[in-house]
Each structure stands twice: as structure tokens, then as C-alpha cells.
Amino acid sequence: MNIPGDLKYTKEHEWLRAEGNVVTVGITDYAQGELGDVVFVELPAEGTEVKKMKALGTIEAVKAVSEIFSPVTGKVVEKNGLLEDDPMTVNRDPYGDGWMVKIEVKDKSEIGGLLSADDYRKLVE
């Protein structure tokens, strides 16, 4: 299981990469493995306001449909259009091309409350 050390994580299995006031969000390698083959991803439109730990979209796989939760409060500034045509990108590359959305963060201190890679590893082992 791949858990990059430079990311932050949620207990709900989302990851976050911070770059200034914008964060990139996706689901973890663990989550995509548990879901199985992803067949559909529903993401919010650019400009949508999202709240920390509230659903921002859904991911549908052969096994189940799950909500995707926002790890921070802010505004969606970009969604990954690649996932509309090729949702299995999430399975192949969850931390790269399989990202979900980019969010402009309202309060960067929210990032500090997320799990480190070591804490997330303990959660899923």
C-alpha cells in the first residue's frame, strides 16, 4: 500500500497536497483498493463552496458507492475532467493523475488538523 509521506490524510481516506492557498484532494491508494474498479466519479463544479468533512462528491465502483469528503473549507477552483472519461485513473494513479479537485482554502490552519502519513498508516494497518 502506497502512503506518500509528503501528503496529509483524513480518517475517511482522502489525501491532500498543499501548494500555497490551494490544495489538491483525492482518495488514497487504500480507499481505491477497497472500492475496486472505479466506474464513475461525480465532482462539484468549479466555484462550488465546500465545507470541511462534508461530502463534495461521490465515487462509484463495482463494489459500492462512496462519498468523497472535503478535508478543508473553501472553494473548488478546478476539478479533474479526466475522470469523467476515464474514472479508472483513480485506480491506476490515485496520488497523481487520479486527483479529484483543487480547493482554495479559507483557513489554512485546518490542514494542520489532518493526519500525517505515519498516523494514516497506523489507521489502515
Image: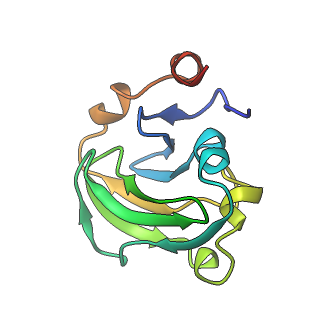
Residue name at image x 64 percent, y 72 percent: 87
Q: Position of residue 88 (x, y in %)?
A: 70, 68
> Which quadrant holds the C terminus?
top right
- Residue found at the very far bottom of the displayed protein: 85
Residue 93 lies in what quarter of the image?
A: bottom right
Q: How is the image coloured?
A: rainbow
- Residue found at the very far front of the displayed protein: 63
Residue name at image x 59 percent, y 52 percent: 35
Q: Position of residue 11 (x, y in %)?
A: 41, 32
Residue name at image x 57 percent, y 34 percent: 7
**Horizontal relation, residue 70 to residue 73: left or right:** right
> Which quadrant holds the N terminus?
top right
Residue 63 lies in what quarter of the image?
A: bottom right
State whether residue 52 is above or below residue 110.
below
Q: How many marks?
A: 0
**Horizontal relation, residue 64 to residue 68: left or right:** right
Q: Position of residue 81 (x, y in %)?
A: 57, 79
State whether residue 31 is above or below residue 81.
above
Q: Position of residue 41 (x, y in %)?
A: 51, 71
Residue name at image x 52 percent, y 62 percent: 100
